[in-house]
Image (cartoon, rainbow, N blue to C red):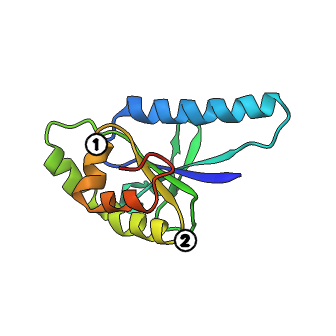
């Protein structure tokens, strides 16, 4: 089973998160209906400063912190909903060290729609040539 991490950054686009969850939940459901092992363990993550005391639930998923030392196989960055992409990118730069560490530990990184600006702005796009099996930029 591949361990999937979906980050919930500041200024995320809810439709993007919902679409990502729907796709991977559907894949898991189709495998379950055929009595096959689930291909994905779906995890929802936020930066520690975004989490409230006692944690939170996001559409049925317990939100985990990026501060936990867990290695994921696949990390997904959703689209953003913002009037100022520059401000949104700055607010979310706290994810960069975590993303870089995940990549160094073998995770594949993928972004959706305007999440690609985040990948590009912080130099994550250089990963394309060496690791593009998930559609990374």
Q: Nearer the viewer, residue 77 or 125?
A: 125
**The label number, if any, that marks residue 136 in the structure image:** none
Q: Secondary structure at mark 1?
A: loop
- The residue beneath circle 1 is 11
| In this view, 94 is above or below 89 | below
- Residue sitting farthest toward the front: 129
Left or right of 29 in this view: 134: left
Q: Which is more toward the observer, 33 or 47? A: 33
Is residue 106 shown above or below 15?
Answer: below
Do the residues under discs 2 and 1 have CB atoms within 8 angstroms? no
Point 26% across, 35% down: residue: 81
Q: Is residue 121 left or right of residue 65?
A: left
Residue 72, percent from left and from top: 57, 60
The residue drawn where x is 46% and y is 62% is 66
Residue 43 image point, x, y percent: 57, 50
Which residue in the protein does label 2 denote? 69
The residue shown at (73%, 29%) is 30
Horizontal side of residue 81 vs 70, given as left or right:
left
SS class, disc 2: loop
Determine the CA span between mark 2 and mark 1: 25 Å
- 10 Å neighbourhood of mark 2: few (<14), some, or many (≥20)? few
Mark 1: few/some/many CA within 10 Å (<14, 14-19, 20+):
some
């Amino acid at each position: 089973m591949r361990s999937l991490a979906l980050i919930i950054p500041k200024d995320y686009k809810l439709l993007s998160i919902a679409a990502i969850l729907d796709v991977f939940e559907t894949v898991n459901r189709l495998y379950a209906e055929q009595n096959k092992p689930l291909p994905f363990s779906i995890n929802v993550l936020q930066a520690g400063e975004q989490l409230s005391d006692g944690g939170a639930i996001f559409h049925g998923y317990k939100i985990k912190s990026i501060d936990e030392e867990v290695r994921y196989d696949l990390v997904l960055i959703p689209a953003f909903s913002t009037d100022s992409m520059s401000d949104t990118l700055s607010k979310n730069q706290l994810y960069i060290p975590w993303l870089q560490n995940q990549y160094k530990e073998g995770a594949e990184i993928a972004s959706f729609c305007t999440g690609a600006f985040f990948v590009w702005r912080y130099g994550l796009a250089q990963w394309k040539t060496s690791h593009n099996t998930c559609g990374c930029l």
